[in-house]
Structures are given as C-alpha cells and as structure tokens.
Image: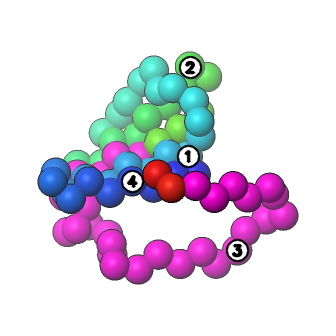
Amino acid sequence: MKINYYPETDSLYIHLADKPSVDSQEISEGVVADYDELGNLVGLDIDNASKKVQLGEFIINQILPVSLKTSAY
C-alpha cells in the first residue's frame, strides 16, 4: 500500500493494489474509489483531504506477517 499526499491540490491518494484502475466511482463527496478490471478496489482518491482526514498523524496498528518493502515515494 502506498499513500501520496499532494499539497498543491490538497488531495490524498491511497494505492491499495499495484494494478491499473479501469473504473472509478464517487462514493462520497470528493472521495473516488478506483477499481480494477475484476471490480476489486485498487485505490482511493480524496479531494480536500486536509478537511476530511487527519494528515498530521499516521499510525499502523497491526501488520500481518508479510514481506515489507520500504522505499521513498
């Protein structure tokens, strides 16, 4: 999973899977869900993110035993 914040547009994109999206649907005002060709959720785009989520804090409560990769995005 990758999370990117773009301050110039105040948008937040959460990449849930490394697959291209082929369909998008607005699920709430300014929140768009992206889906792959099988209908699986692959990402979330949040406009006006600073007004909708707490951007200053990011907490990971639990990670299942999987191979973790770290990189700069």
Labelled disc at residue 4 = 4
Left or right? Give the position of 12 relative to 29: right
Q: Quadrant of residue 25?
A: top left
Decide: is 63 above or below 61: above
32 left or right, relative to 22: left
Badge 2 amino acid:
Glu
How many angstroms separate mark 3 from mark 2 (CA)?
A: 29 Å
In the rendered structure, which segment of residues is drawn in magenta? 44-71
Query: For mark 3, does the 10 Å Cα neighbourhood hold few (<14), some (14 to 19), or many (20 or more) residues?
Result: few
Compute the Cα span from label 4 to label 1.
11 Å
Q: Which residue is mark 3?
A: 62
Q: Earlier in the sequence, mark 1 or mark 3?
A: 1
| Res. 16 mark | 1
Q: Disc 3 marks which amino acid?
A: Gln
Q: Secondary structure at mark 3?
A: loop
| Main secondary structure type of the part rendered in magenta | loop
For the residue carrying disc 2, how many other residues have a C-alpha within 10 Å: few (<14), some (14-19), or many (20+)?
A: few
Q: Is residue 15 above or below residue 7?
A: above
Instruction: Compute the Cα span from label 1 to label 3.
Output: 16 Å
Whichever of labels 4 and 2 marks the residue nearer the N terminus, that label is 4
Marks 4 and 2, how far apart at CA: 23 Å
**Whether label 4 touches label 1, CB < 8 Å:** no
Q: Is residue 57 magenta?
A: yes
Foreground: disc 4 or disc 1: 4
Query: Which of the 4 quarters of the picture holds residue 57?
Result: bottom left
Q: Pinpoint residue 42: horizontal percent, then vertical percent.
A: 53, 38
